[in-house]
Amino acid sequence: MSVLIRGARLYGEGDPVDVLVADGLISAIGSVEPPEDAEVIDAAGQVLLPGFVDLHTHLREPGREDAETIETGSAAAALGGYTAVFAMANTDPVADNAVVVEHVWRRGRETGLVDVHPVGAVTVGLNGEKLAELGTMAKSAAGVRMFSDDGHCVADPLIMRRALEYSTALNAVIAQHAEEPRLTVGAQAHEGEIASRLGYAGWPASAEESIVARDCLLAQHAGARLHVCHVSTAGTVDVLRWAKNRQGPGFISAEVTPHHLLLTDERLATYDPVNKVNPPLRTGGDAARLRAALAEGVIDCVATDHAPHPVQDKDCEWAAAKPGMLGLQTALSVVTETMVATGLLDWRGVARVMSERPAEIAGLPDQGRPLVTGEPANLVLVDPDAAWTVRGAELASLAANTPYEGMRLPGVVTLTLLRGRITAREGKIG
Ligand code: DOR
Ligand code: ZN
């Protein structure tokens, strides 16, 4: 079985070409006559990119299968153009041991819509006190190479130092949710003018920036790789620029979420907890700096922080609501709106921030590869001129907590291929 993608523009550049996919690989590029068994896809006017890689997804299984399962989350990923996702460890039980990471990895394989790479917890139970068995998780069938207590900060500098030191022997990366917990006790929203006016307890930018600065220094001392999750402030961009200059390439990387690129704390005025997220939505000035930093490469990549929550955890008063928003199916469109439509990135740049850099950071050899003959056919086809209206109820996730409800967004994923197999097509699975 082969697939012939007809008339797509690779990275949105140059003349349209045909791309033949057979045996899981890109087998020909140019003007190609369809083999007899080929499924032919008309891709006129569309952009072909390497499949997206999400370093930050909450799939909720095991434990909160009322919010999302590996199956529904994988479907959302495939529909969003992803061919690999990293499943965060804050499940129940926590993915802090080989049994749980192997379970997640195996369920991902069985589902087969996207490569599911479990992230291992840094500390036992995510409680920040005792290092989890990173080595056992690395050596397990899941081959864990990214560790994070995401949802919680590894706040103790000695534990963070030990985790960074240990990770070097495992060729792993520590992904930090940067939030100094002593500065965010009771915090409900970005500490600023809007939160004070509305009476929300504040989450100051410095709670993120101080941890990022500390961790960059610790990583440098350990010669380790640090990945900064969901950068949300202009000050963190300054810290990252300083640290990257000081340390040279390959040690420090950072991600930004689509929602921090587009949405701001003006959303607080809605009082709608769909807008509650951690770190919180920041100011318009922060968002502008994040967009510029992503274009420039100070922030390496986009990661969704896809965080499904069932209706009872979101449809309540702000203070009681859980933080987090859906992201997998809307990421490409939000990046199109904030980065492509504004001229900050071209499609080659989108491939860099949504596929190539995340694959490099996570050390995936078969993702984010160049679109040339002989490479694995992990691909996404995007219609750059189409637009769609987001409806939470129609998304593949079990939960519906999208902050983009009713918004019309540009950029539509029309086809996703995982190792040559169609995983999503025209908004449907398979
Ligand atoms: O908004 C968030 N939701 N931020 C996190 O760090 C955790 C996540 C979740 O698990 O819901
Ligand atoms: Zn987080």
Image: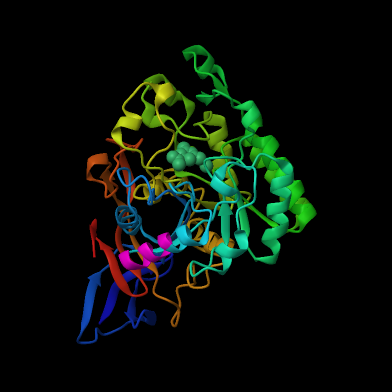
Query: What residue span does the magenta drawing correspond to?
Result: 103-111
Query: Which quadrant holds residue 146?
Result: bottom right
**Res 261 visible:** no
Residue 370 drawn at (x, y percent): 49, 72
Is 109 magenta? The answer is yes
Is 154 magenta? The answer is no
Majority secondary structure in the magenta region: helix
Using residue 272 as the reference point, say whether residue 287 is left or right of it. Answer: right
Q: Nearer the viewer, residue 148 or 358?
A: 148
Using residue 426 as the reference point, say whether residue 13 is left or right of it. Answer: right
Q: Identify the residue at image location x=33%, y=24%.
A: 316
Residue 173 drawn at (x, y percent): 62, 58
Residue 273 drawn at (x, y percent): 38, 27
Q: Nearer the viewer, residue 359 or 132?
A: 132
Q: Nearer the viewer, residue 114 or 267?
A: 114
Query: Which quadrant holds residue 71?
Result: bottom left
Q: Identify the residue at image location x=60%, y=40%.
A: 153
